Structure formats: structure tokens, C-alpha cells
Image (cartoon, rainbow, N blue to C red):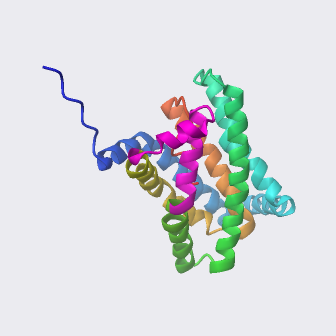
């Protein structure tokens, strides 16, 4: 008598598994962000460094967001995977180029989104403003745009940049399992982090985001020995 097919774990069980796999990275990430934000407000020497970074970001504008995101989300993971011996052998340079193009665009898009948030809700760091910004970011923009498009592009890259294979893979399981899993686990990881990001002056929000993403990707890849881009390494974007 043939064996019955193994049932997939429930989505809640799957979310719990993914979060447990990344909880060390989550804790380290939030400790890093708390340290960076605290030193900005409490340590004058560090405040001066941050203000210089903010001035540099303001001067270079979208060029800063383009290059810093390419470095943090495409070049850094590629180099770490190369050093760890986990880089996929097939089409690696095509993969790197596609990731650089996507993350360069997404970095500028995130920068624009932060500016839009400031225009809509102001630049205060009071509790109400932070709640509104994080809620709009995580519960409106991310489910509607950032997370689905990120997952679709990553799948397209994994499938050798084939749109026909990518379209065929966007089945019910993708929309009812993959997207919700990534979305909910990103909420668990990034809601407290983004509250701290939005507490900074506008010129420093994107630089902090870039630093945090860079360290989080590094932490996740080292802890997991990942063979693909970690799905939690790109904060809701």
C-alpha cells in the first residue's frame, strides 16, 4: 500500500519555525539598533559622526540610497556566500547583476517612501507619529507592495530570470503561504526596529536602515549558512 503524502505543516507552525531560525539575528539586530540610536542621543562624539553621515546622505541624496543598498543587500551577501562556499555555481554573475539592479532601485524607492512618510505625517519622534509611521509602513505599504514584489523578484532571480517560469510558480501556495509567512515574520523582526529608525531625524533614517540591513544580512547568513538570499534579511522591503 503506497504511503500517503506528507501533509505540510500549518502556516502558523511554519511561521514559528522560520522565526525560531532567525530569533538570534532578531535579538542581535534590535540590540544593535538600540545601541546606535542611544549613542546618537546620548554621546556627543557619536552624535557628531551621525550628523556628518546625515550631511553626506543629504548631499548625495538618491545616489547614497542607490549605492548603499546595492552594497548591503547584493554585494555583501554575494561576497559572504563566496567566502563561505555557499554561492550557487550556476549563473552567479547574472544573479549578482540582477540583484544589484533590483536593490539599487529598491533603495531609492525606500528613500522616497521615507520622504513621503515625512511629508504625510511629519518628522516628529513623539509616540503617536512613530506609531502611525510604523503602522503605515508595516501594515499598508509592505503587504500591498514591498513584500510581494520583493518575493516575486527573488523568485524570478532563483528561476534564472525566466518570467514564464516565475508566472507559473505564483500559485495559490505562494499567495496563501509564502507571502503571509514572510510578512508576519518580518513584522516580528522589524516593527521595533523601524520604530527606532523613524525616531531619528530624516537625514539619518536611511543611513541607519542601510547599516541595520547590512548587519542583519551578515548575521543571518553566518548563523544559517544560507545558500540563498535570506528571506528575512530585507526588512519588509
Measured as percent of width and height from the top left, residue 33 is found at 59, 56
**x, y percentage for residue 8?**
28, 38
Front residue of this view, candidates 203 and 77: 77
Residue sitting at x 66%, y 43%: 73
* Percent coordinates x, y for residue 198 in the rendering: 61, 67
In the image, farthest residue toward the right: 59
Task: Tell me: residue 123, above or below residue 45.
Answer: below
Quadrant where the C terminus sits is bottom right
- The residue lying at 57 percent from left, 33 percent from top is 159
Asked whether, in this view, residue 205 is left or right of residue 196, the answer is right
Residue 138 visible to the viewer:
yes
Camera-side residue: 195 or 235? Answer: 235
Is residue 128 covered in magenta?
A: no
**Pick the front one: 183 or 94:** 94
Judge left or right: residue 33 versus residue 112: left
The quarter in which the N terminus is drawn is: top left
Residue 229 falls in which quadrant of the image?
A: top right
Residue at 68%, 37% in the rendered image: 76
Q: Quadrant of residue 71?
A: top right
Q: Which segment is the magenta one?
A: 144-173
Instruction: Evaluate whether residue 219 shows in this view.
Output: no
The residue depicted at 75 percent of the width and 55 percent of the height is 65
155 w.r.t. 135: above or below: above
**Percent position of residue 168, x then y:** 49, 40
Amino acid at each position: 500500500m503506497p504511503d500517503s503524502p506528507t501533509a505540510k505543516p500549518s502556516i502558523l507552525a511554519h511561521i514559528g519555525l522560520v522565526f525560531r531560525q532567525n530569533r538570534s539575528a532578531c535579538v542581535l539586530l534590535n540590540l544593535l539598533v538600540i545601541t546606535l540610536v542611544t549613542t546618537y542621543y546620548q554621546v556627543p562624539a557619536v552624535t557628531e559622526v551621525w550628523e556628518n553621515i546625515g550631511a553626506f546622505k543629504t548631499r548625495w541624496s538618491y545616489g547614497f540610497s542607490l549605492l548603499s543598498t546595492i552594497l548591503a543587500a547584493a554585494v555583501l551577501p554575494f561576497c559572504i556566500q563566496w567566502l563561505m562556499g555557499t554561492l550557487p555555481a550556476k549563473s552567479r554573475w547574472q544573479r549578482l547583476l540582477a540583484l544589484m539592479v533590483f536593490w539599487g532601485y529598491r533603495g531609492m524607492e525606500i528613500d522616497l517612501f521615507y520622504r513621503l512618510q515625512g511629508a504625510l505625517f511629519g518628522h516628529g519622534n513623539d509616540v503617536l507619529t512613530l506609531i502611525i509611521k510604523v503602522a503605515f509602513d508595516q501594515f499598508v505599504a509592505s503587504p500591498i507592495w514591498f513584500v510581494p514584489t520583493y518575493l516575486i523578484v527573488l523568485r524570478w532571480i532563483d528561476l534564472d530570470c525566466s518570467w514564464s517560469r516565475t508566472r507559473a510558480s505564483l500559485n495559490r501556495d505562494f499567495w496563501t503561504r509564502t507571502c503571509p509567512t514572510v510578512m508576519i515574520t518580518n513584522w516580528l523582526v522589524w516593527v521595533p526596529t523601524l520604530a527606532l529608525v523613524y525616531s531619528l531625524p530624516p537625514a539619518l533614517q536611511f543611513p541607519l536602515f542601510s547599516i541595520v540591513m547590512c548587519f542583519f544580512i551578515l548575521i543571518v547568513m553566518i548563523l544559517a549558512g544560507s545558500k540563498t538570499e535570506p528571506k528575512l534579511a530585507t526588512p519588509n522591503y
